[in-house]
Amino acid sequence: MTVPIAGVAAQPGTASDRPVLIFAAASLKNALDEVAKQWQLATGKPAIISYAATSALARQIEQGAPADLFISADLDWMDYLETRDLIKPGTRVNLLGNRLVLVAPRHVSLRIVGLDIPAALGDGKLAMATIDAVPAGKYGKAALESLGMWSAVKDHVVQSDNVRAALVLVARGEARLGIVYQTDAEAEPGVRIVAPFPDNSYPPVIYPAAILRESGHGEAASFADFLRSYRADIIFAGYGFTVLH
């Protein structure tokens, strides 16, 4: 079960009689929905998952949103909450890894030589998540800077609230190219992967997970444990994530 971020402010009932509430990076949706389904089959208990950009979720948590667990798409935003004493000590774990890829609309015939993005882009648009806050956008800008292409493409960048929104722009043909996670690209039939970015051109994409300090939910630890179970590992790997824990 998923809910929009605007709908999580008023969760009725006490911590013990409501579903466990997870805030998770948008790029986790397909895989984490399946993990939550399997957890409910195993325990008989539902989970509510709110997906959005990691930066937006972290700010919501800082402002008191009643989440039980947080799964970030980078280390920085988990560090942000940890330095503010908002996660439970000893519960943080590096859960998953991902890769950055360049995508194009599936129906567009495009060849790219030597990852020359400016040449392939031409006068078209480059879809990215917000480059100064959202992890996928930050990783993408870092890669472009590392490859010496940022100055040539920055005026063509169209920024989206999260990586899934950037993916949609490409799938609809509203952007000629996009920079997204490999798992997102593989889950969207409207795009194709043009090329992966070199692993050394951006920081490692790591998804940490932690229970939040204010969570009083008895099932929070159970769900966190299930995230690291063999059953969850198989699901995450099937969606293209690297299991890190």
Image (tube, rainbow, N blue to C red):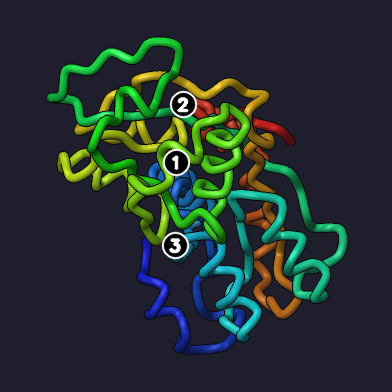
As drawn, the label of residue 31 is 1
- Whether residue 117 is visible: yes
Which element type, helix, strand or loop, lies under badge 1? Answer: helix
Residue identified by numbered label 3 = 52
In depth, the one of 120 and 59 nearer the eye is: 120
Given contact means CB atoms under 8 Å apart, are the residues at marks 1 and 2 in contact? yes
Spatial CA span between label 2 and label 3: 22 Å
Residue at position x 42%, y 56% in the image? 162
- Amino acid type, residue under disc 1 in the picture: Ala
- Structural distance between the alpha carbons of marks 1 and 2: 8 Å
Which numbered circle lies on residue 200?
none
In this rendering, the answer to whether 234 lies above or below 23 is above
Chain-order first, disc 2 or disc 3 = 3
What residue lies at 25% left-to-right and 46% top-to-bottom? Answer: 168
- Which residue lies most toward the front here? 152
Dot 2: element: helix
Which quadrant of the figure has residue 5? bottom left
Three-letter amino acid code at the position of disc 3: Ala
Evaluate whether residue 46 shows in this view.
Answer: no
